[in-house]
Image (cartoon, grey):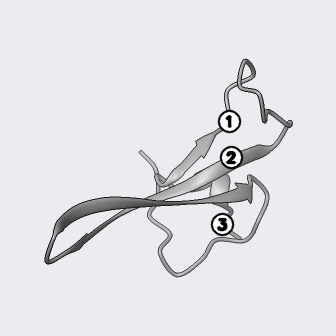
Amino acid sequence: MTTCQDCSFYFAVPENAGDYEPGRGDCVTQKEDAKGKYWLSKPTVHATPSCPTFKKSK
C-alpha cells in the first residue's frame, strides 16, 4: 500500500520548525484558476494511506 511519504507532493516538516513533530508533513499541491496559480497545503502524517492525487516521488 502506498503512503503519503511515497508521494511527490509530501514535504516533511523540518526539525528546526516551530511546529515540528516526528512523522508530520504537508501535502502541497499546485492549482490554477482564472486569476493564476496557487498552492494548497494540508497537514498530514507520513504513514497516511495515499489519496487520489498521489504521484510517485522519484
Distance in Å between CA atoms under marks 3 and 1: 20 Å
Q: Which residue is mark 3?
A: 2
Q: Mark 1: which secondary structure?
A: loop
Q: Quadrant of residue 35?
A: bottom left
Local packing at callout 3 (Cα closer than 10 Å; few below 14, some 14-19, many 20+) is: few
Where residue 22 appears, as percent x and y from the top left, is: 85, 36
Where residue 24 appears, as percent x and y from the top left, is: 77, 45
Q: Nearer the viewer, residue 41 or 4?
A: 41
Q: Amino acid at mark 3?
A: Thr
Name the residue at the bottom extreme.
Answer: 52
Q: Mark 2: which secondary structure?
A: strand
Query: Counting residues from the N terminus, which is met first, the one under dot 2 or under dot 1?
Result: 1
Q: Which residue is mark 2?
A: 25
Q: Which residue is mark 1?
A: 13
Distance in Å between CA atoms under marks 3 and 2: 16 Å
Q: The C terminus appears in which quarter of the rendering? A: top left
Q: Nearer the viewer, residue 51 or 41?
A: 41
Q: Nearer the viewer, mark 3 or mark 1?
A: 1
Q: Residue at x 81, y 43 (%)?
A: 23
Q: The N terminus appears in which quarter of the rendering? A: bottom right
Question: Left or right: 46 with respect to 8?
Answer: right
Distance in Å between CA atoms under marks 2 and 1: 5 Å
